[in-house]
Image (cartoon, rainbow, N blue to C red):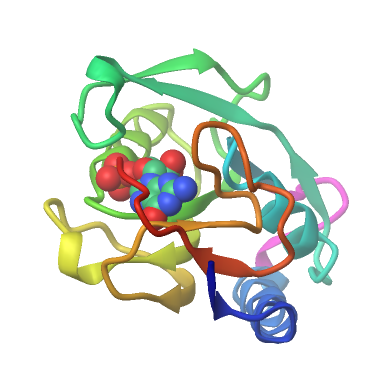
Amino acid sequence: MKVLISETQIQDRVASLGSEVSATYKALLSDEEPLLVIPVLSGSFVFAADLVRELSVPSEIDFIQLKSYEGSSSSGKVEIVKDIRADLKGRNCLIVEDIVDTGLTASFLLESLGDRKPKSLKLCSFLHKPSREEKKVPIDFLGFSIEDHFVVGYGLDFNGRWRHLKEVVIYEGGQK
Ligand code: 5GP
């Protein structure tokens, strides 16, 4: 499998993202009002774990897990199978995604979590495939834009495997 993004490139970019996110929220947060980081399981667990350790602002983590109908993440019909525990009302919230592909999942999340009246709701995605976009979503913080390859590693899987890889690799023969 061909390495698309190396471990060092990932580490450098995630450190920069941590600074970007911290700078954005610096004046808004306190120990009494930490940033609510919402990683989307399972793909973003590695990215989120690294990102929160690069933040210099107070944060809490609350995971959400989704299920796509028809066995495809791109069907657009998404359901929450594990909801967050926190009340979003009046909170500064940051959704952490592994990859924005068609944009359907992220747009569902922005809409359904946005309905819960957070003070702010932003999106941070490790990867983006702009050529696959069906629904435009505002990605406030982005790790890397990539070409239309099916990738695994750094939390991303194929049939449950390869999440542990320290780099992002192109999975030949991979499909959605
Ligand atoms: P979207 O709704 O944006 O089309 O899909 C987002 C989800 O599709 C991601 O959270 C991820 O689970 C899956 N996905 C999209 N592209 C890839 C890819 O290249 N590799 C892997 N492993 N998953 C992907």
Residue 122 visible somewhere in the drawing: no
Q: Residue at x 68, y 75 (%)?
A: 14
Image spot of residue 28 (x, y percent): 66, 64
**Highlighted range, magenta:** 28-35
Image spot of residue 123 (x, y percent): 45, 56
Horizontally, is 151 left or right of 91 in the view? left
User: Which is more toward the observer, 98 or 122?
Assistant: 98
Say if the magenta span includes residue 12: no
Image spot of residue 82 (x, y percent): 57, 16
Main secondary structure of the magenta stretch: loop
- Residue 152's place in the image compared with 53, above or below, is above
- Residue 38's place in the image compared with 147, above or below, is above
Residue 24 visible somewhere in the drawing: yes
Which residue, as the protein is rendered here, is positioned at the far top?
Answer: 81
Count of marks, rendered view:
0
Image spot of residue 32 (x, y percent): 84, 46
Q: Residue at x 61, y 41 (%)?
A: 38
User: Which is more toward the observer, 62 or 30?
Assistant: 62
**In which quadrant of the rendered view does residue 18 lie?**
bottom right
**In which quadrant of the rendered view does residue 25 lie?**
bottom right
Which residue, as the protein is rendered here, is positioned at the far left?
Answer: 134
User: Which is more toward the observer, 173 or 151?
Assistant: 173
**In which quadrant of the rendered view does residue 69 lie?**
top left
Horizontally, is 56 left or right of 145 in the view? right
User: Which is more toward the observer, 79 or 86?
Assistant: 79
Horizontally, is 53 left or right of 7 in the view? right
Q: Residue at x 66, y 69 (%)?
A: 167
